Amino acid sequence: MKRFLTILLTTLALTAALCVNASAANFDSLAEELAAIGMFKGTADGFALDQVPTRGQAAIMLVRLYGAEPEAQNTYRSGRITCPFTDVNETVAPYVAWLADAGIANGTSETTFGAGDPCTAKAYTIFLLRALGYEDNSDFTSATAQDFAAGLGMMDTSAFTGAFLRDDLAALTYQALGTDLKDGSTYLLDSLIKEDVIEYNAAFPIVDKIEKSRALNAASEAACKGMSANIDMSMAVTVSGKDLQEMDRVEHTKIDGKGQIKMIMDKNPQMAFEMKLTADGQEEEAKMWLRDGWMYTQSGETAQKVEAPELAELYQELMSAGVAKNSGTSMLLFLKNISEKTSGSDKIYTLEINDAFANLMNSMVAQVLQESGLEEDVLGTITIDNSAITYTVKNSTLRNANLDLGLSLGMKAEDAEVNVGISLQFEMDIVASGSAVKITYPDFSDFEEVIGGADGPTGIYGALIP
C-alpha cells in the first residue's frame, strides 16, 4: 500500500504540473528578474524578501506597473502635484502623490497614508487588479478581489496562512506582468514595453517565458477539463544512513509501473487510476477511484473506501486552475527556463524549474507533517538534484508529458539518521481529453469503509498509510 501511495502522489504531482496554481514559496530568482527591468529594487539588506512590505513600498510598485514612475517623479518635483499626507517621506512621496492625484489609492485618513504600515495580501492584490484595468465595485469588491484574481490565474492570496512578505509581493508582481489587461489587448508587460516604459531587450527573458507558457497552457486546456492517459514510470530509491545501533546501512529499491489514469473535471470531480507495479521482483496491482467525494482503493485482496471531500476539493482546485483565464501565468513562478522546438508537426516544450519549486515542496511536506501530528524536524530539507519536464503538443493539443526528476531528503529520529535519494522517470501519453473522457466504475458495495477520527485514520493519510 505504501508503494501505491508513492505512485498516487507522483501522479497527482505531475497532473498538478499541467495546471498548477501554487501558493507562496521563496522567489529569489523572480526578484532578480524583476530587478533587471527596474520593477523591483532592493533595500540596504538586499531584496529583504523575508520582510513584510509596507504600504509605501506597495505604492512604488503600483506606480511602476502603471508605467508612470517618470511621470510621478517629474510632476512631483516640478510642484504640479503634491502629497496630501503627512506620514510619507520624500522617497515615497512622488508615488503616493501621483496615485492620490489619479484617484487610484486612498489614505488611511484625510492626512495619513499609512506608508509605514504593513501591506496586506488583499491590499496588494487589489492594487494589481487596478493596474490591469479592473475597477473597484464594478469588476470586484474588497471582499471578492482575491477570488477574482485567482480566477485570472494568479495566486489565491486568500489561502496565505502566514504574513504577506516581500517575497510574495515579488511573485504576485511577476504573475501580473504575464496577465492580460482587462480590455484583452495584450498582457501587462507587453503593454509596458509598447509604451517604452521597459526596454524589450531587458525584458526578453521574461517575455519569452510568458509567451511560451501561454502557448503551452492553451494546448493543455482540454486536458485540464478531462484527461485519459497511459502511464509509464520507473523510480529508483536509495536509502542510506545509520540505524538504531549506529550501523551503516544502504538499501536500493527499484519500482517500475505501467497503468492508466482518467480524470473528469466538473462540479463533481472524478478519477480512475490503475497501475501494475514491479518492485524488487514482486508484482502488485494498485487501483484508485475518486467519485462523489469518496476515495476507493484496491490493492491485492484489500479493498477500502474513505470519505475524502478535502481530496476532491484539492483535486478540483488544482485542475480548475488550468482553465482559468491567463492561467499560464501560474507556472511562471516555478520556471527557470522554457524552450521550444519543432519536430515535424509537433511542438516540444522543455521546462527547467527553479529553486522555488523545491521550497514549495518543503513547505507542503512541513504542512503534511504538522497535520498528521509528526514532528517537523523528522524530515530535513528536500533538494532537487535535477529536473526536466517535457510536453509534446500535436495539432495544438497536449499529447504527452514527461518528467525526469532527481531529489534527495534527510530524515531523522531519536537515534537514527537516514538519507533518501529518489530518481523518477514518469511519462503520460494522453489518448483523450475534454468531453471525450469517460469513466466506468466497478461495484463498490464490498469495499470496506475506513472510519476517520481522532484515534483512527484521518482522511487520505489514514486511508493510504497503514
Image: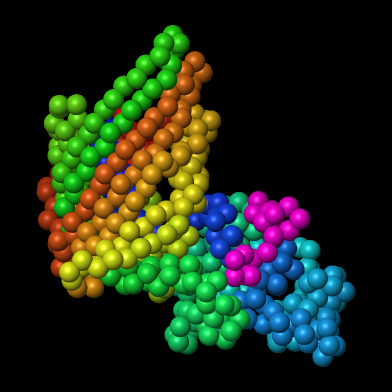
- Residue at horizontal 48 percent and vertical 60 percent from the top: 333
248 up-or-down from 156: above or below: above
Residue 126 picture quarter: bottom right
**Magenta region: which residues?**
35-52
166 in magenta: no
Residue closer to the observer: 58 or 310? 58
Q: Position of residue 349 (x, y in %)?
A: 31, 62
Quadrant of the drawing holding the C terminus: top left
Q: Position of residue 294 (x, y in %)?
A: 27, 49
Residue 323 picture quarter: bottom left
Outermost right residue: 86
Q: Position of residue 57 (x, y in %)?
A: 71, 67
User: Is residue 275 among the parts visible in the rendering?
Assistant: yes
182 up-or-down from 333: above or below: below
277 up-or-down from 246: above or below: below
Outermost top residue: 245
- Which SS type dominates the magenta stretch? loop
